[in-house]
Each structure stands twice: as C-alpha cells, then as structure tokens.
Image: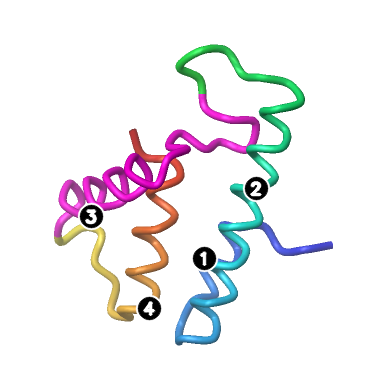
C-alpha cells in the first residue's frame, strides 16, 4: 500500500524525498480529477480527495497565500520540507 500524502510530506528532508512527494501529489491530483469526473462533487465543494484548487493558478495562489498567512509559524528548518508544505497547502488552502 502506498504511503499517504501527508506521511510523504513529513518524510521530506532532501531533494529525492521532495521529488517523491511532488510525484505523489501529482498522482493524488490525477486520482481526484478522475474520481470527480466519475462522481462530480457538489458545486463549491472540494474534490473527492480534498482538492480545493484544481487549476494551476488557483493551486499556486493558495500555496503562496498559505505561506504568507502562516509567516514565521509555518517555517521549517529544512527548506525542502517548507517547499513541500507550500505545495501541499496549494491542494487544501482556500
């Protein structure tokens, strides 16, 4: 069984683990879109796997907004983990 996305996020410490996370995030997005095509969610609801932002623009805007809103609270000592967290926030942050 594949690790959950949030578990992979917690494992990000370097470039290889960051790239594994990015690949899993992409797969999660594709699975969300496939399931949404099969069973469309209610309007203004997240996708079946929790994707709030399904365009690249909305995804990037949400990740950047989360980073700005969390400021010092969201900082990680590891920049790879911080970048992965910003990308994860792009999935769920409204």
Dot 3: element: helix
- Check residue 61 for magenta coloring: yes
Q: How many marks?
A: 4
Residue 38 position in % (x across, y down): 76, 26
The residue that disc 3 covers is: 67
Q: Residue sitting at 25 percent across and 59 percent down? A: 74
Q: Earlier in the sequence, mark 3 or mark 4?
A: 3
In three-dimensional space, the C-alpha distance between marks 4 and 2, rounded to whole angstroms, equals 23 Å
In three-dimensional space, the C-alpha distance between marks 3 and 1, rounded to whole angstroms, equals 16 Å
In three-dimensional space, the C-alpha distance between marks 4 and 1, rounded to whole angstroms, equals 10 Å
The residue that disc 2 covers is: 30
The answer to whether the residue labelled 1 contacts the one labelled 2, judged by CB atoms less than 8 Å apart, is: no
Q: Is residue 33 left or right of residue 73?
A: right
Tell me where residue 75 sits by quadrant.
bottom left
Q: Earlier in the sequence, mark 3 or mark 1?
A: 1
The secondary structure making up most of the magenta span is helix
- Check residue 68 for magenta coloring: yes
Dot 4: element: helix
In this picture, is 53 found above or below 9? above
Q: Residue sitting at 33 percent across and 80 percent down? A: 78
Mark 2 surroundings within 10 Å by alpha-carbon count, few (fewer than 14), some (14 through 19), many (20 or more): few
- Furthest residue in direction top, as rendered: 42
Return the mark for residue 53. Answer: none
Q: Residue sitting at 45 percent across and 33 percent down? A: 52
The residue that disc 4 covers is: 80
Q: Earlier in the sequence, mark 1 or mark 2?
A: 1
Name the front one of labels 4 and 2: 2
Q: Nearer the viewer, residue 69 or 29?
A: 29
The residue that disc 1 covers is: 9
Residue 34 position in % (x across, y down): 71, 37
Quadrant of the image containing the N terminus = bottom right
């Amino acid at each position: 069984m594949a690790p959950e996305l949030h578990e992979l996020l917690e494992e990000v410490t370097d470039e290889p683990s960051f790239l594994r996370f990015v690949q899993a995030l992409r797969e999660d997005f594709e699975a969300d879109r496939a399931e949404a095509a099969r069973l469309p969610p209610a309007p203004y609801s997240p996708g079946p796997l929790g994707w709030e932002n399904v365009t690249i623009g909305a995804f990037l805007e949400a990740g950047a907004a989360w980073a700005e809103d969390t400021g010092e609270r969201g900082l990680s000592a590891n920049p790879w983990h911080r970048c992965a967290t910003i990308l994860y926030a792009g999935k769920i942050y409204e």
